[in-house]
Amino acid sequence: MSTLAPETPAHLPPTDLANHCRSIASRARQASIELASVTGAEKSACLRAAAAQIRADAAEILAANQLDLAAAPGYGLSPAAIDRLTLDAKRLESIAAGVEAVALQSDPVGEVLEESTRPNGLIIRKVRVPLGVVFFIYESRPNVTADAAAVALAAGNAIILRGGKEAAHSSARIVQSIRQAIAASGLPTDCVQLVDTADRAAVGHFLTMDDCIDIAIPRGGESLIRRVCAEATMPVLKHFSGNCHVYVDKAADLAMARAITINAKCQRMGVCNAAESLLVHRAVAARFLPEIASALAEHGVEIVGDEATRSLVPGAGVATEADFAAEFLGPKISVAVVDSLDAAIEHVNRYGSRHTDTIVTADHSAADRFTTRVDTAVAMVNASTRFNDGGEMGLGAEIGISTDKLHARGPCGARELTTYKYVVIGTGQTRG
C-alpha cells in the first residue's frame, strides 16, 4: 500500500519525477475504469468502512497531526492556517462523520436523466456517469483529504491528492486508513492516491496529463489556482476568492441582521464562505451600524468603510477600492451604505467574487430581486454565508466550491463529479 511517507525525498531527478507522476496517473486511470462498474451499495459500504477505520486509527492520526503542528512555525503559517491544520478528537470525529454522510447519499452514477424513443424504435437514454480521474491540489487542511477522497469515490472517480506539505503527516495517515478500507472492501486501491513527493514540479507534470486526468480541482490560495488554470491541459473546477457579502435591507429585522452578520464574519474568519463585506441600506444605517460596529469590535474585527459608514462609526478606517474587493480571511471587514436594493446588487456584482452573498429582509419581492440579479454561485436569504458548505447544504461533504458556470457551480459533492453519456438501444436498426 503506497501512501505519502513524510521522509520521502522532496525532489527526484526530473526524468524520474516525470515517470513517477505518469505511473500515479496511469494507475488512477485504470482504477477509474474498474470503479465505474462498482455498485452504489459497494461504494457506500466502503465509505462506511473508511469512516470506521479513521475512528479506529484516531490515536495514530492525531499523533501524525502533532508532527505537522510542530513543524508549522517553520513554514510561517498564520494563526488561521494553524487552526485549519489542527486536529483534535472532536474534529477527527467530524471527519469520520463526514465520510459517513457521503455514504448515505444516493448514488448518482447510473441515473437516467432523460429517456425517449425515436420513431424508428431506438431508445435514447442520457445516463449519469463518473468524470473519471480527478487531480485535486489543496491547502493544508487534513479534513479536506478525507472529504475529497470520499466524494470522488462516491461518484465512481479515482482521485490523485496533492496536499500541502504543511499537512503531509496528517494527510498521509488519513489516506492510509482510507486505502486500507478500500482494499478490505475489494475495490481498486489506487482509486485514492496521495502524491508522495513535495516537489512542486510534480504539479506541473500532472497538469499536462489530460490523457489520464479528466479534471483538475485546485483549492487554496489565488496564486495556486491561477497557476493551475494557466498550466492545466484539462478542465479546471475552481474559485479564485471568497469576497462574500451580507446586505441588510431597509426591511430587515435588525436583530436577525446582527446575528447573521456576526456569524457570517466571526464564526470562522479564515474560510472562503466567511463574510468580508457588509452593505447596509441608508434607511436603517443610523440604527444598525453603531450597534453592529460595537458587536464586531468585541470580536476584534477592524472596520473600513465609505464616508457614510465613517460618519456613523467614528473608529472606522477608510475603505479603498481594493478593500471592497478583498478577501481578508481575518478580522477585517469592508462596509458601505447603499441608497437602494439595486445599489446593493450593483455593488455585489462589481466587487464580489461570485461565491456567496446574502440578503437580510422581510420583503419577499426584495429577496426575489436580489437572488435573481446577483451574479453569485449561492444567493441566500436571511441566512449566514457560512451555510455555503457541502455538509450544511445536504451534499454530505464537498470537494470544493465552484464559482464557475461550467460545469458545476456552488458546493461540489458527488453529483457534481459526474457527467453523462448517451446510451442508445436498438433492435437492429440501420440508417437509410
Image (tube, rainbow, N blue to C red):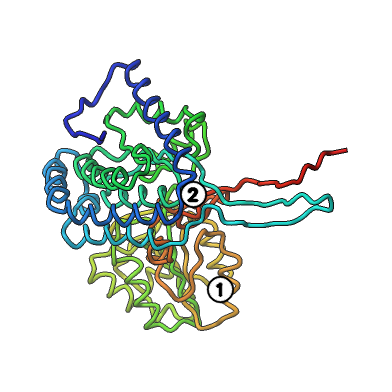
Relative to the observer, which residue lies in front, 253 or 51?
Answer: 51
Q: Amino acid at mark 2?
A: Leu
Q: How many residues crowd around disc 2 within 10 Å: few (fewer than 14), some, or many (20 or more)? A: many
Q: Which residue occupies 43% across, 77% down? A: 285
From the image, tell me which residue sits under label 1.
340
Residue 103 percent coordinates (x, y): 38, 59
Relative to the observer, which residue lies in front, 328 or 307?
Answer: 328
* Rendered view: 419 above or below 256: above
Residue 13 percent coordinates (x, y): 29, 16
Direction front: furthest residue: 427
Q: Specify the quadrant that holds the C terminus.
A: top right
Q: Quadrant of residue 315?
A: bottom left
**Tags 2 and 1 in contact by the CB under 8 Å rule?**
no
Q: Which residue occupies 27% across, 45% down? A: 140
From the image, tell me which residue sits under label 2.
417
**Comparing marks 2 and 1, which lies closer to the viewer?**
2
Sequence order check: which comes first, mark 2 or mark 1? 1
Dot 1: element: loop
Direction right: furthest residue: 432
Residue 172 percent coordinates (x, y): 23, 41
Q: Is residue 185 left or right of residue 120?
A: left
Q: How many residues crowd around disc 1 within 10 Å: few (fewer than 14), some, or many (20 or more)? A: some
Relative to the observer, which residue lies in front, 305 or 386?
Answer: 386
Report how many numbered discs are placed on residues in the image. 2
Q: Amino acid at mark 1?
A: Ser
- Whole-Å distance between the Cαs marked 2 and 1? 39 Å
Q: Which residue occupies 37% across, 20% down? A: 19
Dot 2: element: helix
Residue 407 percent coordinates (x, y): 56, 49
Q: Specify the quadrant that holds the N terminus.
A: top left
* Rendered view: 321 above or below 431: below
